[in-house]
Amino acid sequence: MSILVTGGAGYIGSHTVVELLNIDENVIIVDNLINSQIETIDKIKEITGKDIKFYQVDILDRENLERVFEENTDIESVIHFAGLKAVGESVEKPLEYYKNNLIGTLTLLETMRKYNCKKIIFSSSATVYGEQATSQYVETMKRGETTNPYGTTKAMIEKMLEDIYYADNSWNISILRYFNPIGAHESGLIGEDPKGIPNNLMPFIMKVANKEIDHLNIFGKDYATKDGTAARDYIHVVDLAKGHLKALEKLNNEKSGLFIYNLGTGNPYTVQEIVDTFKKVNNIDVPYEYTERRAGDLTIMYADPTKAREELGWAAEKNIEDMCKDSWNFVKITKQK
Ligand code: NAD
Ligand code: UD1
């Protein structure tokens, strides 16, 4: 049996494929490489010593997506990472985001139904909670107001999956809501390397530490937190990847169902704590300045990870020092050769 991984050449997808190969699963990757490099496929093979099938296919391309299912009749489940994910860009290019994320997912789901493959894990985001009365998010909360088209695509896909399940409860669906993934594989061969100026905190810190950007702007010093900077639930990407294996195990043990899990550590850290820890564990300078708050940012958001622990037997194992060390190790291995 095989697992189809859409977006498997990307940041979270590549780490998940490594973990799947480590437990001897057969993996087929579909990725159009719009935000990733072909070299990642070789790096995955180098890390695991295993082979994978790779198709450079856009999930909106129904004909070629069907070809993948025709050529691999043993595809039993799909882990669906493929999507555009830059919050700021989604505000500027909403049509591109709605088209890629919504029509892409729709095409994938129709293709799955056609080939009678009804087991899927979907990459959602904590952003679907929006702003809630409390800052620790639990799966029983209703989805909130999303603040950008990217977040809206995640909320809409969640709803779409729910509707599909209610119409045909032979589907077996797991929606995983990621908090803030950072870090990299311990080999330093794969990690997150966004093109251009990054929006997210850790990729920005990595570029400042590597002297590609002269300083970090810390957005806001007047939040109601211990040091005035905003707090998030950062999770090591390898822990996140392992969460997918547990979610898949759960689906394999169920006949059908629709499950939603937070994947976070449950421990919020402030921007200041992340910067200070990065500097300390890597013994490197990260110049920074405090600037205005970034529009739309919340003071603090973090997961209640109880459901994933109780139902999946999954909990994050790596700490903030590991996340900072592994992020920098990826830069050292890949950029400073
Ligand atoms: P990524 O950009 O590194 O990976 C996504 C991959 O999908 C890329 O390799 C890209 O080339 C591919 N892709 C995009 N559109 C495609 C299409 N139409 N057809 C085929 N391939 C396509 O992003 P990531 O950080 O690995 O995120 C993976 C998933 O997790 C995304 O759906 C993202 O929205 C979601 N997510 C990410 C975060 C995060 O902070 N990284 C947080 C919450 C949710
Ligand atoms: C955002 C998105 C989320 C998405 C995630 C990862 C929202 C509400 N959240 O989360 O959907 O899944 O990115 O792509 O849209 N910071 C700085 N300086 C910087 C960059 C960031 O101080 O240069 C701060 C931010 O103000 C924030 C924290 O670092 O407090 C984390 O920011 P970021 O990495 O962008 O993630 P989120 O905003 O939490």
Image (cartoon, rainbow, N blue to C red):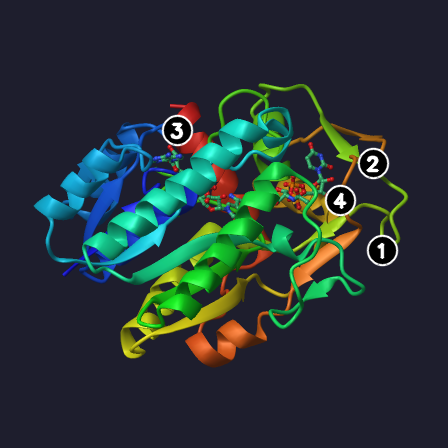
Residue nearest the viewer, comparing 19 with 77:
77
Which residue is located at x 87 percent, y 41 percent? 221
Give the x, y percent position of residue 51: 14, 45
Task: Mark yes or no: residue 241 visible.
Answer: no
Measure how far apart labels 1 and 4 are at the Cα level: 10 Å
Q: Quick one: label 1, few (<14), some, or many (20+) residues within 10 Å?
A: few
Q: Quarter of the image containing the N terminus? A: bottom left
* Mark before the other along the chain sequence, 1 or 4: 1
Q: Amino acid at mark 3?
A: Thr
- Residue 226, labelled with which disc? 1
Considering the numbered disc 3 on the image, is that residue within a helix, a strand or a loop? helix
Whether residues under marks 1 and 2 lie with C-beta atoms below 8 angstroms apart, the answer is no
Q: Quick one: label 2, few (<14), some, or many (20+) residues within 10 Å?
A: some
Whether residues under marks 2 and 4 lie with C-beta atoms below 8 angstroms apart, the answer is no
Q: Quick one: label 4, few (<14), some, or many (20+) residues within 10 Å?
A: some
Whether residues under marks 1 and 3 lie with C-beta atoms below 8 angstroms apart, the answer is no
Q: Which residue corresponds to mark 2?
A: 293
Measure how far apart labels 1 and 2 are at the Cα level: 16 Å
* Mark before the other along the chain sequence, 2 or 3: 2
- Residue 157, labelled with which disc? none
* Mark before the other along the chain sequence, 2 or 4: 4
Task: Mark yes or no: residue 143 visible.
Answer: yes
* Mark before the other along the chain sequence, 1 or 2: 1
Q: Amino acid at mark 4?
A: Gln
Measure how far apart labels 4 and 3 are at the Cα level: 26 Å
Ligand 1 sits in quadrant: top left
In the image, which is nearer the foreground, mark 2 or mark 3? 2
Q: Which residue corresponds to mark 3?
A: 334
Give the x, y percent position of residue 243: 42, 63
Q: Quadrant of residue 313?
A: bottom left
Which residue is located at x 50 percent, y 46 percent? 183
